């Protein structure tokens, strides 16, 4: 439906206490994990809060949010700077600290209830919001001159006609992954709550660690140790020829590609809820004859990869199985593997920066064919996270040191084929997306939880075959439970003809209860 979201004001946000900047050496170099992500890729999520009908208090007043952001920058001062990329070797750093973050104030002419989706049991979903949620984010331009000269942190505060509020929060992926992103949002909410109605300056109970892992490698390593690091041969990464590495500010990266292949048909994003019961049935279906175990993520990812691949084979003028790409990819969070209270040895508690390595593999047609057992696909995905890179911390450290030692980091690539037919799955459902994201309280002092926390489908994330597994609103009350199944909202982007085929596929949602 048509809706009007209008930005009425824009503010530049600075640190509340500039003494916080003095705690770091500037410019702040980024680390090897941070260089495995294209510099123009954002992490962008919309948080929606519904106004209480009996409350006269304004929900998330923008002035208080502004003060909370100022306090946030005391803990994350690099978010007030700008990204810089060295032309000689592609390395990145944060300079111009104090240029400021950005806070936009906007109004929506419709009440929030106008965006309830009949297709989703009357719930508000990201695709039902103005411009699929994109209108609730600050405008974004991925051109490198804009990336290098624009704010690293942007927040758009949008008030609906009913008083409800959406917060569209965007960071750059080269500074943090999903774990770091949601930590920053929890910290913003904690500081906001600490402010109360007055000018209290409560600090964070667990401050972040913002210095990127191994960002000082070149400053401390000896020539001998650097050569030893370069001699290692990682299983997940390789180097392209110098002639193939772009020598400009664009700095090609591992994930995702600078220019994804554009399919012939438009790509559409949809949100589908998989209940805990449906997921448990799918896990049982993905269990092997000898009890081979699969996680919820592995079972669902295997199921989606198979059904989408088979749908591609049914497209008009479909390619033959031998010519269709069947690569699978998912990122692995290495924080727990590299956790250490000693910064020199690993990632301390509260680590903010990137800690992801992507793992991928091609799959045979026979593995994905109609009638092929799901447990075999799930086992391939299961084994990816149990390769030596992830099971042996020494191999993991050597892999990251190999990246850090490169004379030109732009030459680093992974083995994934980003052509049509590939499938990518990102596990956000075990991240604390809803947990700790409450800003205000009701008249009884109870926290007001987010009605929705979801990433919009943006022009950058509308990649055919890219799926995010996202937690639902129940997480706020249940917490992050890694041992039991919870509902999952699947955010999946596919070319439009594939959706038509999947809609007619009885196997796609075979375990869904009517």
Image (spheres, grey):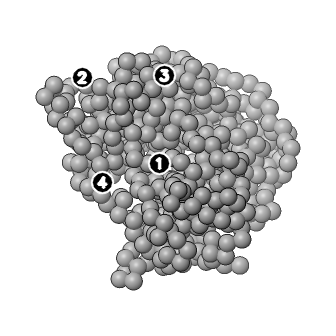
| Label 3 crowd bin: few (<14), some (14–19), many (20+), radius 10 Å | some
Find residue 42 and report its horizontal and vertical position in percent.
Answer: 55, 36
- Rounded to the nearest angstrom, the CA distance separating label 1 from label 3 is 23 Å
Seen as rendered, the residue at the extreme left is 224
- Residue 334 on image: x %, y %: 35, 49
Find numbered disc 2 in the image and state the secondary structure of the residue it sits on.
helix
Tell me the distance, in whole angstroms, between the alpha carbons under discs 2 and 3.
23 Å
Q: Nearer the viewer, residue 442 or 497?
A: 497
Residue at mark 2: 219
Q: CA distance from mark 2 to mark 4?
A: 27 Å
Residue 417 has which mark? 1
37 relative to 337 in the view: left or right:
right
Expressed as whole percent of the image width and height from the top left, the position of residue 378 reads: 44, 68
Taking the view exactly as shown, the residue that stands out farthest to the bottom is 289
Residue 161 image position (x, y, % from top left): 83, 42
- Quickly name the residue at label 3: 249
User: How far apart are the alpha carbons under marks 3 and 4?
Assistant: 31 Å
Query: Which is closer to the viewer, label 3 or label 4?
Result: 3
Neighbours of disc 2 within 10 Å: few (<14), some (14-19), many (20+): few
């Amino acid at each position: 439906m048509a809706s009007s979201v209008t930005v009425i004001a824009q503010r530049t946000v600075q640190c509340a206490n500039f003494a916080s900047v003095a705690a770091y050496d500037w410019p702040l170099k980024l680390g090897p994990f941070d260089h495995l992500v294209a510099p123009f890729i954002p992490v962008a999520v919309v948080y929606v809060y519904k106004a209480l009908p009996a409350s006269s208090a304004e929900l998330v007043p923008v002035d208080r949010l502004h003060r909370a952001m100022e306090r946030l920058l005391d803990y994350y001062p690099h978010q007030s700077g700008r990204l810089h990329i060295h032309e000689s070797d592609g390395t990145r750093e944060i300079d111009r600290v104090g240029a400021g973050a950005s806070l936009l104030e906007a109004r929506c002419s419709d009440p929030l209830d106008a965006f309830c989706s009949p297709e989703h049991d009357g719930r508000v979903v990201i695709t039902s919001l103005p411009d699929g949620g994109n209108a609730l984010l600050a405008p974004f331009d991925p051109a490198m001159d804009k990336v290098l000269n624009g704010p690293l942190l942007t927040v758009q505060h949008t008030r609906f006609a009913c008083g409800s509020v959406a917060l569209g929060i965007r960071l750059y992926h080269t500074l943090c992954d999903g774990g770091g992103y949601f930590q920053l949002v929890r910290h913003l909410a904690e500081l906001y709550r600490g402010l109360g109605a007055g000018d209290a300056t409560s600090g964070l109970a667990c401050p972040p660690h913002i210095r990127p892992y191994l960002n000082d490698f070149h400053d401390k390593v000896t020539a001998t140790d650097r050569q030893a690091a370069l001699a290692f041969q990682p299983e997940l990464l390789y180097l392209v020829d110098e002639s193939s590495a772009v020598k400009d500010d664009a700095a090609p990266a591992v994930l995702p590609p600078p220019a994804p292949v554009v399919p012939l048909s438009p790509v559409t994003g949809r949100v589908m809820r998989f209940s805990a019961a449906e997921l448990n049935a799918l896990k049982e279906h993905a269990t092997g004859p000898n009890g081979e175990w699969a996680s919820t993520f592995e079972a669902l990812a295997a199921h989606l990869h198979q059904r989408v691949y088979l749908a591609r084979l049914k497209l008009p003028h479909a390619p033959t199985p031998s010519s269709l790409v069947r690569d699978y990819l998912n990122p692995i969070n290495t924080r727990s593997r590299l956790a250490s209270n000693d910064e020199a040895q690993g990632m301390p508690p509260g680590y903010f920066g990137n800690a992801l390595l992507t793992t991928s593999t091609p799959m045979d047609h026979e593995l994905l064919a109609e009638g092929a057992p799901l447990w075999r696909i799930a086992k391939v995905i299961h084994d990816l996270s149990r390769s030596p890179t992830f099971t042996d911390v020494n191999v993991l450290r050597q892999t990251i040191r190999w990246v850090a030692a490169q004379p030109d980091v732009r030459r680093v690539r992974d083995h994934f084929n980003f052509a049509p037919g590939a499938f990518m799955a990102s596990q956000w459902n075990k991240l604390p997306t809803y947990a700790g994201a409450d800003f205000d309280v009701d008249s009884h002092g109870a926290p007001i939880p987010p009605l929705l926390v979801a990433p919009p489908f943006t022009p950058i994330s509308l990649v055919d075959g890219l799926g995010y597994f996202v937690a639902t609103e129940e997480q706020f009350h249940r917490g992050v439970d890694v041992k039991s199944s919870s509902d999952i909202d699947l955010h999946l982007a596919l070319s439009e003809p594939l959706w038509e085929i999947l809609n007619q596929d009885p196997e796609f949602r075979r375990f869904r209860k009517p």
